[in-house]
Amino acid sequence: MIVEIHGGSRPVEADELFNTISKQNENPALFDAEGVQMKPTHIEHIGIAVKNLDAAIKYYEEVLGLKCYAIEEVKDQKVKTAFFMVGETKIELLETTDPEGPIGKFIEKKGEGIHHVAFAVSGLQQVLKEVESKGVQLIDKQPRKGAEGLHIAFLHPKSTGGVLTELCEKP
Ligand code: ZN
């Protein structure tokens, strides 16, 4: 693997890369696996920010051969979403309905691409308390309603190695 360090490129070892990432965390979690209550069962979905939902759906259907089974607007998040099933995991395409919405701002800053990863958990309320007690910054202290009626909560990417992380639970 090659990473950019202070303008120059050189191969780095995996543990060196991990250390670099850890140092970037402003609010590092205590990585202690003992007594962990959260046991995600699978990746519930991967959220992908797109500029044009129709064009993106066409790619997922006509190139990847997946079938869009639902399109849903989540007013709260100012997004229109399209869902595809891949095994137990979904792909969630996100198009903003407002340039000032979270996906609109994301695309303006970073362009299209992976926006978040969502893990399926049970006991979300309890899991959030546990995660917070480990020093992880929560975006949502209480579960709220997401697409498909799931209860969801986000963890701040500052605490998760740069990956906006969603936890979700079936109601
Ligand atoms: Zn999501």
Image: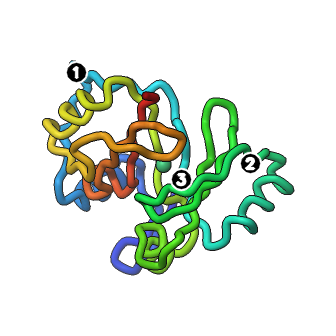
- Other-residue count near label 1 (Cα within 10 Å), few / some / many at <14 / 14–19 / ≥20: few
Q: Which residue is mark 2?
A: 68
Q: CA distance from mark 1 to mark 3?
A: 30 Å
Identify the residue position indicated by label 1 in the image.
Answer: 34
* Residue type beneath disc 1: Glu
**Callout 3: SS:** strand
Q: Mark 1: is the Cβ under 8 angstroms from ligand 1?
A: no
Q: Is residue 36 left or right of residue 162?
A: left
Distance between the alpha carbons at the discs numbered 1 and 2 = 40 Å
Between circles 3 and 2, the one closer to the viewer is 2
Name the residue type under label 3.
Gly
Q: Locate the C terminus by quadrant.
A: top left
Q: Which residue is mark 3?
A: 47
Which amino acid type is shown beneath numbered disc 2? Cys
Residue 6 in percent (x, y) is at 34, 77
Mark 3 closeness class: few <14, some 14–19, many ≥20 residues within 10 Å? many
Residue at horizontal 23%, vertical 57%?
25
Task: Kindly report which numbered mark, 1 or 2, lies closer to the viewer in this rendering.
Answer: 2
Spot occupied by residue 83 in the image (x, y as percentages of width and height):
65, 47
